[in-house]
Each structure stands twice: as C-alpha cells, then as structure tokens.
Image (spheres, rainbow, N blue to C red):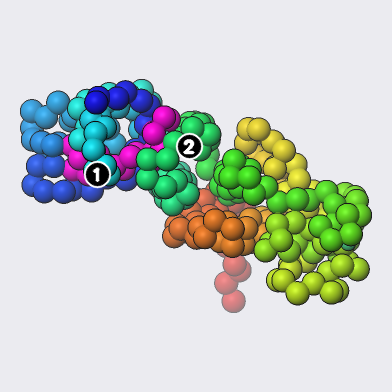
C-alpha cells in the first residue's frame, strides 16, 4: 500500500553507494525510516527533493512488518534554507530533530509532535535562534506527553504557590513543586526554584507559541536554572537526554551580539 503524508527530515545517512536511509517524523504515521534507492545517482528523481529540516510531501510503501520502508516519491513543501546557512540555528534544529526522534517510537502516530516540530523549525528558520525557544519546545513536548510540571500548588499539601513565593522546591521525580514545609520531609530529589525562574516556567508552559518565551527578559543564570529543571523532567520521565543541547545553547550564546568593550589599557 502506498501512503501519502507530510514529513520532516530528522536524519539522513548513506546506505550504499547509491542509496540513502532517511528518518522522518511524519504527520500521520509517527517516525518512519525509508530507504531512497538510487538517491545518489545523477539522474535520481529524488535529487534536491529532501534535505535536513525540510518538510516534504512523502509517498512510501507501507506493507509488511519491516520498519525500513521504501520511499516512492517526495517533494519539498518547506526547505528552510536559513537553517543550513546559520550554524547556531542548525545546531538548534539538530537538537530538536534528535529530541523528536528520541521521543517518538517507530511508526506510532504522533501528530502533535509533528505539528510542534514543524512550527518550531519554521520559527527557527525565520528568527535568530534563542535558548528560550529550545526550552519552550521541551515544555511543549512534556505537555503533549501528559507530563507538564505542576507549578500552581504544592504536590503534597495542595497549598497554593503564589507568584513571588520564596523557597519553593521543584521535585522533578514527582513532577512539580513542593512548599518549604513539605520540602523538608521530601525523600525524592528536589531543587530550589527562585521566584523569577518559576514565573518564567509558568508563563512559558502556558504559551501556545514561542512568542512569550522569546519576549521574556531572562539572564543566562536564570536560563541555565530553567533549562536544568526542564532537563531533569525530560531525563527522569521520558529518559531523554539527547546530545547537542549544551552545544546548541553555547553556540547561540557565543554568536549573540555583545556590547562593544574597549580594549584593555596597556601597562
Ligand atoms: Zn506543601
């Protein structure tokens, strides 16, 4: 049976002198791996039709129980060429593709993850990359996995945790906050969360687009703290710690324009 769907290219690798293996996140069939026969031949029908971070219209043969499918045709819908010219944006896109690959079992439909990745790559191709975009994507991934951290009440006593409250603790194994009194008796690992970082986490978690995170004024220290909390959630609950996150964040920071500093005075 030939099926047609939209699909984002997650990874590419040569399979032989002429064929390639392509890993896709499809809208309708989840993560699909296809072989593209003759992909490297000069007259291949597939030349220029797919590349890293493209969204394509993909036709593939879906029959039998094997998980290496044969691609029949593909054509690009979005090429996002900016992601292949801008190194920090490429590193961020690679991280998001790797995370999406790790979060999606083979051929289990995951349409919300497809929509999230497609939307975030669009954003990344049109705007300068920012660590806040990566954190927003991770929070959205936790949300569509039913694992949004609970940030409004203490998980043990149920007390409201108001904005600005101090000495709150984030117990990632439990998936949310503990008030100071309950944190004293907690046996699972818990990290202190400052009111500023908690406010950002709450606002970003509720934001259906990356607009709010990208407008938030946040220092590198606050960002590191927020990334650490979200990273613990991903690692503990989804067993996701794909490489590339730290590299993407550092590359983005190192290429952000900094204020000009005068040279040091010579002795
Ligand atoms: Zn409590």
Ligand 1 lies in quarter: bottom right
Real-space CA distance between mark 1 and mark 2, rounded to the nearest whole angstrom:
19 Å
- Which residue position holds label 1? 66
- Badge 2 density bin: few <14, some 14–19, many ≥20, Cα 10 Å: many
Q: Residue at x 62, y 58 (%)?
A: 233
Q: Is residue 26 magenta?
A: yes
The reply to whether dot 1 and dot 2 touch (C-beta < 8 Å) is no
The disc at residue 205 is none
The answer to whether any part of residue 80 appears in the image is no
For residue 226, what is the image quadrant?
bottom right
Q: Is residue 130 left or right of residue 17?
A: right
- Which residue position holds label 2? 110
Tell which of 31 and 191 is nearer to you: 31
Which quadrant holds the N terminus? top left
* Secondary structure, magenta segment, majority class: strand
Q: Residue at x 88, y 54 (%)?
A: 158
Residue 201: give x, y in percent of width and height: 73, 49
Residue 258: give x, y in percent of width and height: 59, 51
Q: Is residue 38 magenta?
A: no
Residue 212: give x, y in percent of width and height: 69, 36
For residue 168, what is the image quadrant?
bottom right
Tell which of 207 and 82 is nearer to you: 207
Residue 130: give x, y in percent of width and height: 57, 45
Upstream in the sequence, badge 1 or badge 2? 1
For residue 95, above or below residue 204: below
Q: Residue at x 23, y 38 (%)?
A: 64
For residue 32, above or below residue 253: above
């Amino acid at each position: 049976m030939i099926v047609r769907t939209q699909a984002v290219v997650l990874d590419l690798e040569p399979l032989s002198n002429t064929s390639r293996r392509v890993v896709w996140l499809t809208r309708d069939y989840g993560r699909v791996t296809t072989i593209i026969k003759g992909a490297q031949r000069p007259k291949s029908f597939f030349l220029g039709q797919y590349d890293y971070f493209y969204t394509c219209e993909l036709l593939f043969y879906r029959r039998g129980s094997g998980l290496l499918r044969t691609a029949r045709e593909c054509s690009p819908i979005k090429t996002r060429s900016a992601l292949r010219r801008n190194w920090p944006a490429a590193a961020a896109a690679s991280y998001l593709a790797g995370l999406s690959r790790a979060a999606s079992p083979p051929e289990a439909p995951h349409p919300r993850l497809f929509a999230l990745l497609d939307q975030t790559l669009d954003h990344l191709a049109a705007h300068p990359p920012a660590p806040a975009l990566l954190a927003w994507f991770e929070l959205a991934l936790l949300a569509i996995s039913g694992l949004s951290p609970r940030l409004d009440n203490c998980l043990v006593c149920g007390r409201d945790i108001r904005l600005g409250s101090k000495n709150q603790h984030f117990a990632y194994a439990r998936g949310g906050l503990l008030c100071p009194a309950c944190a004293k008796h907690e046996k699972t690992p818990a990290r202190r969360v400052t009111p500023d970082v908690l406010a950002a986490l709450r606002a970003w978690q509720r934001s259906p687009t990356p607009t709010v995170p990208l407008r938030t004024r946040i220092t590198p220290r606050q960002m590191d703290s927020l990334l650490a909390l979200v990273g613990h959630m991903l690692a503990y609950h989804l067993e996701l710690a794909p490489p590339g996150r730290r590299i993407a964040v550092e590359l983005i920071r190192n290429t952000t324009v900094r204020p000009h500093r005068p040279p040091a005075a010579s002795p």
